Amino acid sequence: MDHTDTPPGAIRRVVIAGGGTAGWLAACALAHQFRERLDITLVESEQIGTVGVGESTVPPIRTFHRFLQIDEQAFLRAVAGTFKLSISFEHWRRPGDRYIHPFGITGQSTWAAGFHHFWLDAQRRGMASELGDFCLETLASRADRFALGTDPQVNYAYHLDAGLYAGFLRRIAESHGLRRIEGKIREVSRHAHSGDVEALVLEDGQRLEGDLFVDCTGFRGLLIEQTLQTGYEDWSEWLPSDRAVAVQTESDGAPVPYTRAIAHEAGWRWHIPLQHRVGNGLVFSSRYMSDDEAHAKLLRDVGARPLRDPWLVPFRTGRRRKAWNGNVVSLGLASGFIEPLESTSLHLTISAVVRLVQLFPFDGISPALVEVFNEVSRAEMEHVRDFIVLHYHATQRDEPMWVACREMALPPSLDIRLRAWRERAHAWQHADELFRVDSWTHVLLGQGIAPGPPHPLARALGDDDLRRLLEGIRAPIERAVTQMPTQQAFIERYCRAGTAVWGAAAQR
């Protein structure tokens, strides 16, 4: 690539530090969009393991894949993927309880009042039902069914093998001209005057110079923190879990179309079914459970044969004070971490990658655009944080950790949401928030937070009209679900992974 006409300060050489899912998401998007305009290099070491547990996603990943012109069937075959309609929350409000947080639209809302107001008023009048009865994704999850092309249209995400996904993205990025270098970073060289990062020096002496650096080095944040000392805002006062132990097991039956999140005395456990195995992990607070106890509990509770030894993932919830600092943009775990309860880790990485593409500083780094990037990143992280804190705070469990969460002071932004719900059954979403009104209402109700009186508009409907409205929504959803095959049957004909894929996964 000829850079003879490059103006001073222009960005033409991008160096991505670290692979894993975050590194290859960035590499894939930048190489796809800017292959003619940038020299992009990614350096990673196969000796440095990745966390490798980001296997559950949320629906916006499909929009990102369309942006990258990724074929869905080819992708699912490559990552041994399955479909995800919802998250099943088990034992959260109290042991024995279960509710579903679905991805789809629930009922029909008016401009003045959300559907849940009409449903709440129907309950008040003695018309018994569950909110999930009016959501296609909830009914399909209950029946373990899945199909595309339904009417109404199904909203879904994926379960995927994180290691296979990184490999899939790598093949795409390299086809667009990205250069990958195998090696460990020995030191980070900085400009004498500006303090910006100038180059990465590898253990073999190679020097990788760049104009913009993308830090995907995981929790250690080699560039953003160890080099630039950006600072970290700790959120452990609201989110007590600080460790996870993970293990992959043999499949224990046909894959269900949802992630399971199962609460226990000191945290919760995930269960993510892929085509060839199940991803499991126990998230816990080290204040209430030891590593050995968590290890033993996970192996006891998974109920299937482990495919490899469990591994420990210590973490610290919070966010980097600046996701973009100088000429370093941090992505994935390097930019912060909110525990995996609502499967947001991959989404936050993808969202930041898209933001970088939109604000890319070809003509030099603009302080105003860096500020925009950081402000949007902060707001997005805080919104997700509040939604996760809600799950911990709103329970009736009596173990010490859960009691402490129930009694803790909340972030003011979450406190006002809960007060608005308790006083007037009001839930809202801002335009750029990941979790919509439907998500908030299902979780608020599922976790046992009683709403205040519904919107007065709901009372204007007579009983017969309200019954007709509810039945008119429920009937076509029930019909659609009865016509769906099981997820296993759908996968067999749509995206079955070959044994070569399974073998690659098993060897990792």
Image (cartoon, grey):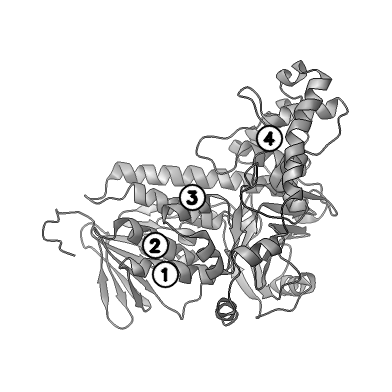
Is 394 or 406 nearer to us in this picture?
A: 394
Q: Residues within 10 Å of mark 4 (few under 14, many from 20)?
A: many
Kindly identify which numbered label has been placed on residue 170: 1
Circle 4 sits on which residue?
Answer: 418
Q: Is 308 situated above or below 102?
A: below
* Amino acid type, label 1: Arg
Q: Eyeballing the image, is 300 above or below 149?
A: below
Q: List the residue tagged with mark 3.
A: 63
Decide: few, some or many residues near mark 2? Use Cα within 10 Å; few <14, some 14-19, many ≥20.
many
Q: Secondary structure at mark 2?
A: helix
Q: Of callouts 2 and 1, which one flags the residue occurring earlier in the amino acid sequence?
A: 2
Disc 3 to disc 2, how far (Cα)?
15 Å
Secondary structure of residue under mark 1: helix
Where, quadrant-wise, is the C terminus in this rendering? bottom right
Q: Are marks 4 and 2 in contact (CB under 8 Å)?
A: no
Q: Residue at x 77, y 40 (%)?
A: 133
Q: Dot 2 corresponds to which residue?
A: 28
* Amino acid of disc 4: Leu
Q: Which quarter of the picture shows residue 190?
A: bottom left
Q: Are marks 3 and 2 in contact (CB under 8 Å)?
A: no
141 or 294, nearer to the observer: 141
